Image (cartoon, rainbow, N blue to C red):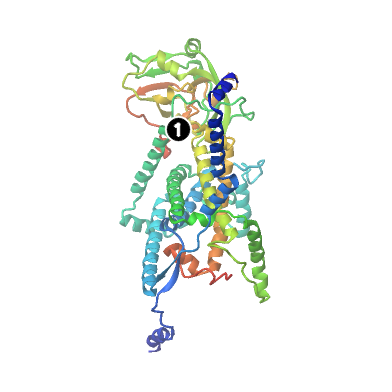
Amino acid sequence: MATDRERAGAKAPRQRADEKDARKRSRAKRPTLGERLRRVAAAAAEPPEETFEARPQWLASRSRRDFMLFGAGILVIAATGWWLLPERTKRRWLPTAHDRLDSLAARVGLTPEQRERQLNRVLTFDDDVAEALYSRTRAVRTYDRPDLRPLRNNYHGRTPGPEHVAGWRLNLTGLASGRAESLGLGELTSRFKRHDMNTRLVCVEGWSHVAAWGGLRFADLLAAFPPAAEARWASLRSNVSLNGRGEHEPYYVSLDLETLRHPQALLATHHAGAPLTLAHGAPLRLVVPMKLGLKNIKAITDIAYTTDEPADFWNERGYSRYDGI
Amino acid sequence: MNDRTRPLTAAKARPAPPREPVLVVRKHDLWVRVSHWGHVPLLVGLIGTGLAIYWAAPVFRHAPTPGNPRGDYLADLGIALASRFGTSSAPSLWLYERASLGPSQLASALRLHWLFAYLYMVCGAMYVLGLLRGGGWRALMPRASDPAEALAMIRFYLGVIPNALAKRPWPHPPVAGKYNALQRGAYLTMPIVGLLVVLSGWAMHHPATLPWLERAFWNYDGARVVHFVCMLILGGFMVPHILLVAADGWDTFRSMVTGWSLRLKGTRHGH
């Protein structure tokens, strides 16, 4: 207040009156809101239609050229569309003609092998976009409460029996020490701090579930047992997994170390406040909420750090490799 | 013999094309035309692969019923259509087998959906840039007169068939500009819905790395619902669009291929 008065007092009254006038004038010059809206409307107003004179022959030849291009476009798109369709869809839609159309397409180089190559490039591109969006410092959204309905066990095979849990150990290879480590569940839970979080598990199929997880940070395991300096990847494997007929069928996923160093990448021991059930990956599973559910491998038995990208179960079956969401 | 002479006489009977220049109207920018037609295969591809993805985990569901253990409304629709048109295969899959790549094709459908989605974004951007480049966007801007004009158009459309049957004259309401109010509304809605379908798609594709976008649709399932509704609007738009262009005639169709029209203002919907 005092400073205001001082500043005002420092100026001559005449000068003050001039400033006031100037301000008033500039305010008068400045358009009102209504005036501004009118100007915007005038700029957006549709102008009268634009006409030009043309000789009929010129119009006919132009029209012919454009429709030939249009027709050529339809043919190219129809051929490409047919080539892109999965084999099973083609067989179902045109059970009698699909063989002949396929050999016709193959004659111009549109073979199924070419298609697989091109579509896998699309997957790689999309994975690169996902990787560019990912940041280890950005937290994944957490929720106050988990979903109340039971968490779905969507594993494609059967659930392994309880017998493997008693003698369970986690085997680590590819470490900086050059040794192979083997850790029991007690060692993991006593040595590392437990973290809890409610995050959304998103399935590649489209359903999702906010679940309450508890476990140790993967980053803590990486700090305690550092991988070899040149390692960029981890291969996580469950040797106790079963297929749909109950036969032994290992499940394995590839994960980049950049993801595993995220503070919300957990080696979970608990779900919904209780130790993991067999259906949800007892005794230890991965929870990476920045990846699709299929990377959240259950009943992990082996972790190997590698320089090159390791094999991934669902990538071998036509799904993407990075699976960042 | 007759066969050879007939075309000649027919050609003679046709009036000779005028030699003097005619007046034509510039209608659609090249970019608008190319991307307009590009949207057709892309939307068909996106819906066909999208429904195959939707099959894996339907959003709109009710309590399980005997023929429909997942309670999927689209399976109900398939069962209804199958009993209407007759089918030998599983009726609950009737719609998925015909309108999409089919059931159990998730990996293929996802790959193709990403391909079409990236192309759709390019195509949509091209359409908007074409509207800006050619000044076509001005014809889509809403006006104060739109509600009254839209009501007049609805009244006109409702009366077309009864008046045609009664052989009564039924004049088209006057149209000031390139489009009538209903067209303007529909053509402006499409790019907006297109933007929404892209944003909700990204929200589902990257809920973890784009959490702000996921929140914009409330949550993951909110984005799925918006994505599905946008698909219905985009697909539903095609039906009246094609019917009305067919009713309007060749000149309107040609103008989206060649860019020009012979129909000068006042020659059709006369003022």
Picture coordinates of residue A270, whole percent (x, y)? 55, 20
- The answer to which of B35 and A199 lies nearer the viewer is B35
Check the image and report above or below for B165 versus B226.
Answer: below
Q: Residue furthest bottom?
A: B1
Q: How many marks?
A: 1
In the rendered image, which quarter contains the N terminus of chain A?
Answer: top right
Compared to residue A52, the image places residue A245 above or below, namely above
* Left or right: where A206 falls relative to A68: right
Place of residue A228 in the rendered image (x, y in percent of width and height, measured from the top left): 33, 18
Circle 1 packing at 10 Å, graded few (<14), some (14-19), many (20+), is: many
SS for callout 1: loop
From where the camera sits, is residue B91 visible? Answer: yes
The residue under label 1 is A324
Q: Residue at x 32, y 15 (%)?
A: A178
Q: Is residue A207 visible?
A: no
Percent x, y for residue B193? 54, 48
Residue type indicated by callout 1: Gly
